[in-house]
Image: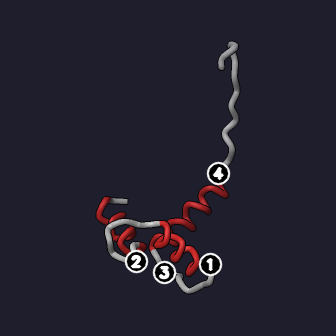
Amino acid sequence: MDENTLHEILNEVDLNKNGQVELNDFLQLMSAIQEGRVSGSRLLILLKTAEENLERRVPIPVDRSCGGL
């Protein structure tokens, strides 16, 4: 994702348009998502994609040898 796209997505979440995504902005978005009032948000799409990737992730075994840490 390029920097301009990231700024566009953050501007969608910045409800009071002060240039910062404050806790209240984030909580309002999450509440709207949970209640089904938001479905096309690019941030929502990114979060769902990240969640799906985490669910498909396979644990990486850590084998230690030679008395390492």
Query: Which residue does the numbered mark 1 point to in the structure image?
Result: 34
The mark total stands at 4
Residue 61 horizontal side relative to residue 22, left or right: right
- The quarter of the displayed image where residue 42 is located: bottom left
Q: Nearer the viewer, residue 1 or 69?
A: 69
Query: Which residue does the numbered mark 3 point to in the structure image?
Result: 40
Instruction: Name the outermost residue toward the left.
Output: 4
Residue at 47%, 70% in the rendered image: 43
- Residue 57 numbered mark, or none: 4
Tag 2: residue type? Leu
Query: Which residue does the numbered mark 2 point to in the structure image?
Result: 15
Tag 4: residue type? Arg
Q: Residues within 10 Å of mark 2 (few under 14, many from 20)?
A: some
Q: Position of residue 18 (x, y in %)?
A: 32, 71
Residue 18 horizontal side relative to residue 24, left or right: left
Pick the quarter of the image with the N terminus. bottom left
Q: CA distance from mark 3 to mark 2?
A: 16 Å
Secondary element type, mark 1: helix
Instruction: Name the outermost residue toward the top.
Output: 66
Q: CA distance from mark 4 to mark 3?
A: 25 Å
N-terminal-most mark, 3 or 1: 1
Residue 38 horizontal side relative to residue 9, left or right: right
N-terminal-most mark, 2 or 1: 2
* Residue 5 visible, this angle: no
Tag 1: residue type? Gln
Q: Residues within 10 Å of mark 4 (few under 14, many from 20)?
A: few
